[in-house]
Image (cartoon, grey):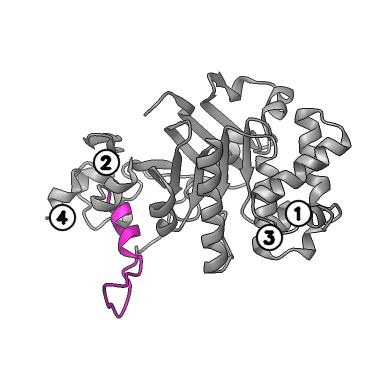
Amino acid sequence: MTEALLELRGLTVDFATDDGVVHAVDGLDLALGRGRTLGLVGESGCGKSVTSLAIMGLLPPENSMVGGQVMFEGRDLLSLDAHLIRDLRGARLAMIFQEPMTSLNPAYTIGDQIIEAIQRHQGLDNAAARARAIEVLKLVRISVPEKRVDDYPHKLSGGMRQRAMIAMALACGPQLLIADEPTTALDVTIQAQILDLMRALRRDTGTAIILITHDLGVVAEMADDVAVMYAGQIVERAAVRDLFARPEHPYTVGLLGSIPRLDERRERLPSIEGRVPDMTRPPAGCRFAARCPFVEPECRAAPPQLIEVAPGHLSRCRRAPLSQVAA
């Protein structure tokens, strides 16, 4: 990998709740190079979105505790004060949220919301900021951007609202774009258009992307590298081709096995039995042990480490390389 644009070093996120402290993210180490796409996958509750909010500095300060380092362009974002973070957020790093209808303000036009970010970070006057807003709406392939810039969110379809969110995120030319489930609730045709758009944007602007999704098909199509999260930890990390060709953690095997395939006819898709452990009281050993088909007594005794099982391929399983065990 080239020099990292973003590097997470031992990132932890805890939440104080009435039921105890929730250990949502536990010792995350990740790196993302300039112009590359990292797929962050795992089922709901594994810590993916919390990780993205920690990077952006958007976690609620009243009950969240963040530790470790978030190194972005050589600076630790966690050590910066709120004013400096606001200067970076939207300008150098930006985020597309899961549901554009709840992320866009219904009381303001699409153009007003894009223009606000442009003027905040680039200091342009009204006419220049409006011209830039129309330019980015055109960039994300919204038809007749000169008219759409004055539309309110409710007048746009789901796919158009998602494009408007992407335009807002790209308005100031960020180096890092975090896309949290950018194709959720979109039909297949619109989903393909959004993914094509993100590919084109990365190619044309060199923006690095963290793609958070449940959809491994999207990851296979979009990502250069993949990190699989489970119960607040990375359990496997590899180049996308290596992970799909030879998954080395039982959780990844289960995720891949649950994907429908056109070349196979199965009456019932396999599933991963059980659920994510209670993160107020995480297991002492492997956090996947209660659901793992390869579990052994020592798996429950002590937590496994993330080890390199092949060049550039890391797995948090004491039986790795799993491909040899499964064979």
Q: What element carries label 2?
A: loop
Q: Distance between the residues labelled 4 and 1?
A: 54 Å
Whichever of callouts 2 and 4 sits on the residue coming sooner in the sequence is 2
Mostly what secondary structure, the magenta segment? Answer: loop
The residue at which mark 3 appears reads as 160
Q: Name the foreground residue: 285 vs 97.
A: 97
Q: Quadrant of the C terminus?
A: bottom left
Q: Looking at the image, is mark 1 or mark 3 earlier in the sequence?
A: 1
- Which of pointers 4 and 1 lies earlier in the amino acid sequence? 1
Which residue does the numbered mark 1 point to in the structure image? 145
Q: Which mark is residue 301?
A: 2
Residues at marks 3 and 2, CA–CA distance in whole angstroms: 51 Å
Taking the magenta stretch, the answer to whether it contains residue 280 is: no
Give the mark toward the camera: 4 or 1: 1
Q: Crowdedness of circle 3 by 10 Å Cα count: few (<14), some, many (20+)?
A: many
Q: Residue at x 27, y 46 (%)?
A: 242
- Which numbered mark, 3 or 2, is in the foreground of this view? 3
